[in-house]
Image (cartoon, rainbow, N blue to C red):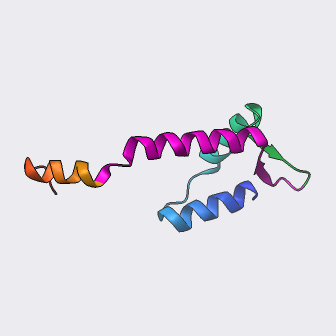
Amino acid sequence: MTGAEITQELEKRRGHRPSPGTIYPVLKYLTEKELLKVDKDKKYSLTKKGEEELMLSLNTFFDTFCDIDEMRTHCRCHGYEK
C-alpha cells in the first residue's frame, strides 16, 4: 500500500484521517528499522524481519490478553463494569 492508501484505510477503520505528518515519519522509521520496504511505486510492504516482529508482537498481545473474559468477570465482581 502507498502512504495515501494506508491513510485511507486507517480513516475507514478508525473514523479519523491521520495527517501526513503522522503517517510518513512512522513509515520512514519502520523502513529504517528494516521492518518495511518501499518499491519504485512507493508501495510499502513488510520485510521478512517485519513479518517476524509482527508475529512476535501478536503472540505477546495474545499471551497478555488471552484471559480477557476472566479479567472482565473479576472487574464486574468489584464494581468496575461500565
Q: Position of residue 9 (x, y in %)?
A: 61, 64
Q: Nearer the viewer, residue 8 or 50?
A: 50
Q: Position of residue 50 (x, y in %)?
A: 71, 41
Q: In the rendered structure, does residue 62 fall within the stretch colored magenta?
A: yes
The image quadrant where one finds the C terminus is bottom left
The image quadrant where one finds the N terminus is bottom right
Describe residue 36's horizontal placement relative to residue 58 as left or right.
Answer: right
Q: Residue at x 88, y 50 (%)?
A: 39
Q: Residue at x 24, y 48 (%)?
A: 71
Name the outermost residue toward the top: 33
Name the outermost residue toward the right: 40
Q: In the rendered structure, does residue 16 fall within the stretch colored magenta?
A: no
Name the outermost residue toward the bottom: 12
Against 9, residue 81 (above or below) is above
Q: Nearer the viewer, residue 1 or 47?
A: 47
Count of number-bearing discs = 0
Q: Which residues are magenta?
A: 41-68
Q: Main secondary structure of the magenta part?
A: helix
Describe residue 82's horizontal placement relative to residue 50 as left or right.
Answer: left
Q: Position of residue 15 (x, y in %)?
A: 47, 65
Q: Nearer the viewer, residue 69 or 6?
A: 69
Q: Residue at x 64, y 47 (%)?
A: 23
Against 76, residue 50 (above or below) is above
Residue 57: quarter of image:
top right
Q: Position of residue 64 (x, y in %)?
A: 40, 41
Describe residue 9's horizontal placement relative to residue 41 as left or right.
Answer: left
Q: Residue at x 27, y 55 (%)?
A: 69
